[in-house]
Structure formats: structure tokens, C-alpha cells
């Protein structure tokens, strides 16, 4: 399976550390094709053991899955007109503090082509109260094995 993981950058953040560490662990035991898609590839926190490409290549993931972790990545998912499965793993609720318009937020979080995953019940409740959609999955930690389970279930 081809897996495209959308990150804003590769520099220091808890999300990047956990995701890249998980990718590096996973690629040791799989033949899945994994790519990180990001806008800013400078200042890498740790070196990923996979391809790193620009987000403009998201539509090239025609078989497999695209995974985003924030609303910026989710907008990339929405613009990627391809048959790949699309997952939004809501890592943080950063949009609460931003100035993203409600219509964009609503359209993104209710997009039926994107499956929602949250880290906990509190995040799931916030999303459900805000847009009336309950996330399909709850995963406390990001693991590639869990992502594969979700993709097989879809």
C-alpha cells in the first residue's frame, strides 16, 4: 500500500517527532511505499527513512492512503483529486486559536471523502458539537498498524 503522510514541516514538534519515529520504525518491517509530503523540508528534526516530497504531489498517491494531522493538511487532502483514501488524524485543536473561517472549517470537517480520527473523546466531542459529525475512529497514538487496520476496514 502507498501511504502519503502530510506534514507542514520537518522541524521540531512533538507531532513530527512521533510521526517520523513511527515511520522509521515501520519501514524496517514493511514493503509499503511511504512518503512524507510537506511544504518546508528544511531543518529536519530527525532524518526520515522514506521519501520526502512537496505537497503538490499529493494527487499522485492514486492507490493507498493520504493522512493529514491538521487543517492545513486537510485542505491539501481536499484539493487532492485522487482515489486514495483520505484520513484526518486530529492531533491538536489548533484551529480553535486561529482565524480560519467557520465555513472552511465546517466544509473540511464534514467532507465525506475524509475519515476523521481523534486522539481522545474530548476532541471527538468538540468536533461533534461544532459541526455535528462524530469522528469515525479514536486512536490515542499514531501507529502504522492501526492505520492499516482502518484502511482495510474502509
Image: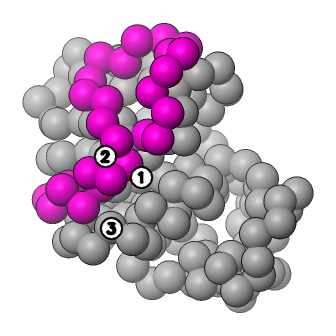
* First-in-chain label (1 vs 3): 1
Between the C-alphas of marks 3 and 2, the distance is 11 Å
Q: Residue at x 59, y 84 (%)?
A: 107
Of the two numbered discs 1 and 3 in the rendering, the one whose residue sits closer to the viewer: 3
Q: Quadrant of residue 95?
A: bottom right
Give the CA separation, mark 1 to mark 2. Answer: 6 Å
- Numbered disc total: 3
Q: Would residue 145 be seen by someone viewing this image from the given angle?
A: no
Q: Callout 3 environment at 10 Å: few (<14), some (14 to 19), or many (20+)?
A: many
* Position above or below: 46 against 6: above
Which badge, 3 or 2, comes first in the chain's sequence? 2
Residue 91 lies in magenta, yes or no?
A: no
Q: Considering depth in this image, is 132 or 15 the residue closer to the camera? A: 15
Q: Position of residue 2 (x, y in %)?
A: 18, 46
Q: Nearer the viewer, residue 95 or 154?
A: 95
Picture residue at 26% right of the left edge, 45% below the top:
3
Q: Nearer the viewer, mark 3 or mark 2?
A: 3
When the figure is inspected, residue 151 is found, relative to residue 11, above or below; the finding is below
Evaluate if marks 1 and 3 touch, with contact meaning CB atoms under 8 Å apart: no
Q: Which residue is mark 1?
A: 67
- Magenta-colored stretch includes residue 43: yes
Question: How far from the left and from the top, in percent, is residue 96?
Answer: 85, 62
Q: Which residue is mark 2?
A: 4
* Rendered image: mark on residue 80: 3
Magenta highlight range: 38-63
Determine which quarter of the picture holds residue 127: bottom right
Residue 12 shows in this picture: yes
Counting from the top left corner in percent of width and height, residue 99 is at: 83, 66
Element carrying mark 2: strand
Helix, strand or loop at mark 1: strand
Decide: is 49 above or below 112. above
The quadrant in which residue 47 appears is top left
Amino acid at each position: 500500500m502507498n501511504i502519503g503522510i502530510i506534514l507542514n514541516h520537518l522541524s521540531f514538534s512533538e507531532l513530527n517527532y512521533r510521526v517520523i519515529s513511527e515511520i522509521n520504525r515501520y519501514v524496517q518491517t514493511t514493503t509499503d511505499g511511504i512518503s512524507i509530503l510537506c511544504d518546508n523540508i528544511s531543518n529536519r528534526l530527525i532524518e526520515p527513512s522514506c521519501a520526502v516530497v512537496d505537497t503538490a504531489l499529493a494527487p499522485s498517491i492514486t492507490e493507498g492512503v493520504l493522512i493529514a494531522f491538521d487543517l492545513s493538511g486537510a485542505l491539501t487532502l481536499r484539493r487532492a483529486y485522487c482515489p486514495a483514501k483520505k484520513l484526518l488524524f486530529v492531533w491538536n485543536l489548533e484551529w480553535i486559536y486561529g482565524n480560519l473561517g467557520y465555513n472552511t472549517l465546517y466544509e473540511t470537517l464534514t467532507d465525506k471523502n475524509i475519515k476523521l480520527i481523534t486522539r481522545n473523546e474530548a476532541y471527538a466531542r468538540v468536533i461533534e458539537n461544532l459541526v455535528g459529525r462524530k469522528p469515525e475512529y479514536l486512536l490515542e497514538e499514531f501507529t502504522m498498524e492501526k492505520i492499516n487496520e482502518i484502511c482495510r476496514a474502509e
